[in-house]
Image: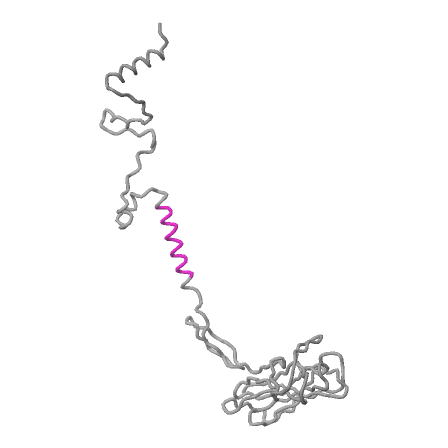
Amino acid sequence: MAPRWRLILAGLTVAGAAGGAWWVSSRQDPPSPSPTGARLPSPHFPGGQPPVIAAEAITTGTLAIERMPREVTGALEQHSAEIVKNAEAIESKQARITGTCAPGSAIRVIGEDGSVSCQKLPKGVVSVAALAGVPRLSGTGTAQGSVAGGVGRFQTSGEDDFLVVPVPLPDGATVTAFTYYYYDASEPVDGVAYLYRSDDRAMAAAATSGAADEVRRVVSEEIQVPRVDAARFAYFVYFQTSAEAGANLVPISASVAYRLP
């Protein structure tokens, strides 16, 4: 008896000769209907053949949600929840603050549109740095001076001069004290700082005394015309400098204390 594989090969040869050609396909035919007429599950899709979704139904938005695969509907629901969450977060954010408060007052309430309501403080202090000062005379040379405990400006050339720095004071305030911070290690030269009004009226003065290798301060509570009239006058500080003293006389800062009515 011939081996079984020879019989199978002979059968395939006969079939090929009868049809003119033959081939072996790995594709499986769709399952046959059951005796009751119901279509049996495909071996490739045990859970049933997934529905065919037309591309135009997706792009036009006419595809019913119940016809979409579960993975798609789950992703859409998660994405929608994130959109709502982001919208709520954006709506709850505070708008950029656009309002400002004048010197001597503080922000009390911030509106949703970024506007502010201000409240005057009962007292306050305004400080200015000598490093930002401009020499009164155009021919005066100055340089930054750094010492232990402070940074200021000193004179390098020219006749003895002053550095001028504007100081913003709240209208209606009453000046109560003037304080000068400085470095003075010069024996022959002392320094002074003045608080002035723009009508060339001196309001306060604070002078240095002696020489020391450290930052010191001097406070003056003797104030002339102490009430601030910002509608009419501007206010500024004069810091004295000296080419002779050079880096041994370094104005650092001045502060103006005040109270409000």
Which secondary structure is most common in the magenta stretch?
Answer: helix
Residue 224, given in percent of the width and then of the height, sits at 61, 93
Quarter of the image with the C terminus in it: bottom right
Q: Is residue 68 magenta?
A: no
Q: Nearer the viewer, residue 44 or 164?
A: 164
Horizontal side of residue 194 vs 1, given as left or right: right
When the figure is inspected, residue 78 is found, relative to residue 215, above or below; the finding is above
| Residue located at (35% from left, 7% from top) | 2
The residue stretch that appears in magenta = 73-89
Quarter of the image with the N terminus in it: top left
When the figure is inspected, residue 58 is found, relative to residue 238, above or below; the finding is above
> As drawn, which residue projects farthest toward the left?
37
The quadrant holding residue 247 is: bottom right
Residue 202, given in percent of the width and then of the height, sits at 61, 93
Horizontal side of residue 14 vs 201, given as left or right: left
Q: Is residue 88 magenta?
A: yes
